[in-house]
Image (cartoon, rainbow, N blue to C red):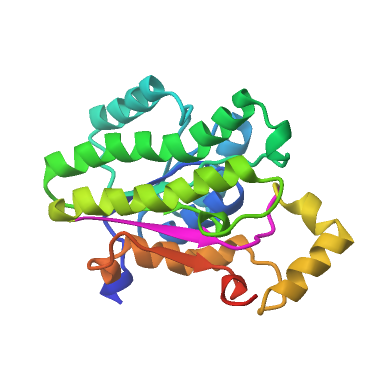
Amino acid sequence: MTLFDLTGKTALITGSSGGLGYAMAKGLAEAGARVIVHGRNTEKLEQARQALAEARHDVLVTSFDVTDEAAIERALADLDAQGIDIDILVNNAGIQLRKPLVETSHEEWQKVLDTNLSSTFLMGRHVARRMIARGQGGKVVNIGSLMSSVARPTVGAYTAAKGGVRLITQSMAAEWAEHGIQANAIGPGYMITEMTQPLVDKPEFNDWIINRTPARRWGTPDDLVGTVVYLAAPASNFVNGQIIYVDGGLLSVI
């Protein structure tokens, strides 16, 4: 269906050498997009590139610190020099910190906010400037969390950052919609990744998630693919400033 066809589009997915980001990059590639895979671990980045290339997808790689504005601008300028325009930006890079607020240092707090929230602003600003200058619109997909709307103990910094992601997504829509840019967010539920595997391995927590989630299971990275393709595709051209929770129904129950 042409509504979901990304042929001819280029998508940059931050934090996509593994986990949720890689699954979304692969899904966008399967929908026809050329994908730019991003990460800091060069070995994992090359493994991701090889896997996508072997599947006959059009793939490029880039490596920079998403919290370093100068590094962001250098990377985007390098793409400019190659004649590569970004049509779809997926702000996925992020970190977690599990620590009570009273034990969280200012430095730890700032690192979580910089990596999860400030990077979304910085990447969005620099890419949107280019989209606006080209005059052909574009798509920005920010990755939030269940914690974009609710809180749990020991993840206060992450909750603040992901709540900010939801609101900056609305701000992006408010300012960029007139330029044909749609900015939306995805709020993943509890997904099995390298980052969450220690929680899966805790019987008490694992049982809590399964019993708390109406779908009675953890999510997988592939569960995000349909939503990210939808938000990156023409099918969502009049959808702006929204967050779609992919959580197995968890936020719908008490």
Residue at the image point whose x is 58% and y is 68% from the top: 247
Would residue 131 be found to the left or right of residue 204 on screen?
left
Residue 11, percent across and down?
Answer: 36, 49
Vertical comparison of 20 with 85: above or below: below
* Count of picture labels: 0
Would residue 60 be found to the left or right of residue 154 on screen?
left
Q: Is residue 183 magenta?
A: yes
Q: Name the image quarter holding residue 212.
A: bottom right
What segment carries the magenta color? 181-194
Residue at the image point whose x is 80% and y is 50% from the top: 198
User: Which of the two residues, 113 or 193, is positioned nearer the viewer here?
Assistant: 113
Residue at the image point whose x is 69% and y is 47% from the top: 195
Residue 217, percent across and down?
Answer: 71, 73
Residue at the image point whose x is 31% and y is 26% from the top: 78
Q: Name the image quarter holding residue 231.
A: bottom left
Residue 177, percent across and down?
Answer: 19, 55
Which quadrant is the C terminus positioned in?
Answer: bottom right
Is any atom of residue 16 visible in this view? no
Q: Is residue 135 magenta?
A: no
